[in-house]
Image (cartoon, rainbow, N blue to C red):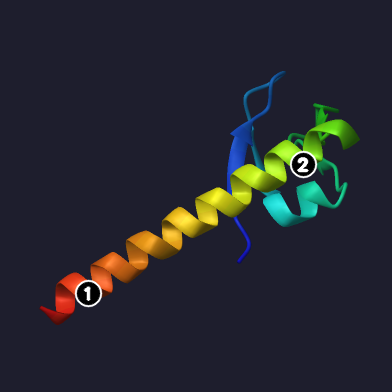
Amino acid sequence: MNVQSTVPCPDCGSPIPIDCQLLLSGTRFQCPSPSCGVAISLAQEDRGVVSKAVTEFEALQQHALNSAQQDRAI
């Protein structure tokens, strides 16, 4: 499952769309504003922490979906 999100550009505030899986693989995400040159990426040493957080988020999301399905079945 891909977790997609947006983060505000720290320079101009424009929303920067990111895909967590691509972010973890080393992809840089550029601010979409033509007048801004900011890019977001992860340092190699931070990838493990973010990967763990994404995995835990996906598990929580799946648990919530399973609970909602069980509630509807009752």
Residue type pointed to by label 1: Gln
Location of mark 1 (residue): 70
Residue 48 - label = 2
Disc 2 residue type? Gly
Q: Quadrant of the N terminus?
A: bottom right
Q: Which residue is painted at 25% across and 67% down in the image?
A: 68
Tell which circle, 1 or 2, labels the residue nearer the N-terminal end. Answer: 2
Q: Quadrant of the C terminus?
A: bottom left
**In the image, residue 7 above or below residue 17:** above
* Residue 9 x %, y %: 68, 27
Q: Secondary structure at mark 2?
A: helix
Q: Residue at x 88, y 47 (%)?
A: 26
Work out whether residue 32 can be spotted. no
View extreme (bottom): residue: 73
* Disc 1/disc 2 C-alpha distance (Å): 33 Å
Q: Nearer the viewer, residue 39 or 2?
A: 2
In terms of image quadrants, where is residue 38? top right
Other-residue count near label 1 (Cα within 10 Å), few / some / many at <14 / 14–19 / ≥20: few
